Amino acid sequence: MSLRERANIGFDRRIDIEWLDAAAGRVAAGYGPTEIREFLWGMLNGVVGGDTVHSARGKTLTVLMRIWVTVPPAAEPLRDAAIKRISSASPGERLAIHWAMSVACYPFFAELAAQTGKLLALNGQASLSQVVRRMTETWGDRSTLPRAIQRILRSMVQWGALSEGIEKGIFMPPEQRVMVSDGLAELMVRAILVSHGRGLALTQATSHSALFPFDVKLNAYGARNSDHLSVARQGDRSEFVELTAPFAKSMRSVTG
């Protein structure tokens, strides 16, 4: 059984983008984890049912905290960079920032986004049944899997990253991809590298299927100017990108 088959799904709630904005806003304002948890718990009262940590509200809070507050160690440098950009970001840029954090913090979200992106590129649409079938191959035949997938896809619709097709269970790509460049593009590439736990060809990272709602513009020159990325020329003259030593060490300590 692979590492991913043993991993917890974790992200198994529908998450509205306004909730992510609220969590990121509190982090940006300098509030501590306890204060943020209390604020988000109150915000979700009457919106998501339950009064315990194991209720729907408790599980929703856990997802929000994992993405922006109690992030994995490998994603902490990414979160710190993301939080500097969130306050001045446009709606499309905020979507990209939340997406990057979700990819970096939740392997399940990253792979679901990648499989959805592959289906959209292949067929122009993605069905719930196709996505479930592909995810089952790597995450195992779990009773909780279809519901978690459906909730994440619904979240993506609410965020504007997907649209619903005419037929039930069919999802379509966004009408227009969000173009990201410069520092925000670097952020998204870093998220992909954290998720993969290793370096990738630069073109593979920028065009990764997990980033399907975005047009990521980062060339080798821009990557070399980053303090967080290291770029090397491969034998086929393509560019290979990985996290610089301090961040790669942190990533390896988590991915094992």
Image (tube, rainbow, N blue to C red):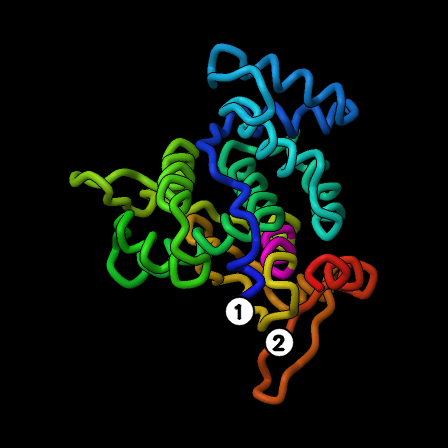
Separation of disc 1 and disc 2 at Cα? 8 Å
Task: Name the residue located 52 percent from the left edge and 55 percent from the top edge.
Answer: 216
Q: Which residue has dot 1 on it?
A: 203
**Badge 1 density bin: few <14, some 14–19, many ≥20, Cα 10 Å:** some
User: Is 56 within the magenta?
Assistant: no
**Which residues make up the magenta segment?**
187-193
Look at the numbered discs 1 and 2 and tell me whether their residues touch, using CB distance below 8 Å: yes
Q: Amino acid at mark 2?
A: Glu
Image quadrant of residue 234?
bottom right
Spot occupied by residue 92 in the image (x, y as percentages of width and height)? 49, 37
Q: Quadrant of residue 243?
A: bottom right
Q: Is residue 57 above or below residue 93?
A: above
Q: Can you identify the residue that label 2 sits on?
A: 239
| Relative horizontal placement of residue 149, taking residue 230 as reference (left or right) | left
206 or 218, which is in the foreground?
206
> Residue 31, image x and y in percent?
77, 22
Label 1 amino acid? Thr
Mark 1 falls on what kind of element? helix
Q: What residue appears at the point 73 percent right and 68 percent down from the top-left corner?
A: 230
- Is residue 76 at least partly visible in the picture? yes
Disc marking residue 44? none
- Residue furthest right in the image: 246
Q: Disc 1 or 2, which lies upstream in sequence?
A: 1
Q: Could you tell me residue 207's position as x and y percent?
A: 48, 62
Mark 2 element type: strand
Residue 226 visible from this viewpoint: no
Residue 118 x %, y %:
36, 61
- Taking the spot 71% from the left edge, 64% from the top edge, the residue there is 256
Is the residue 133 above or below the residue 92 in the image?
Answer: below
- Residue at the spot x=55%, y=29% of the render? 59
The part of the image, by quadrant, that contains residue 251 is bottom right
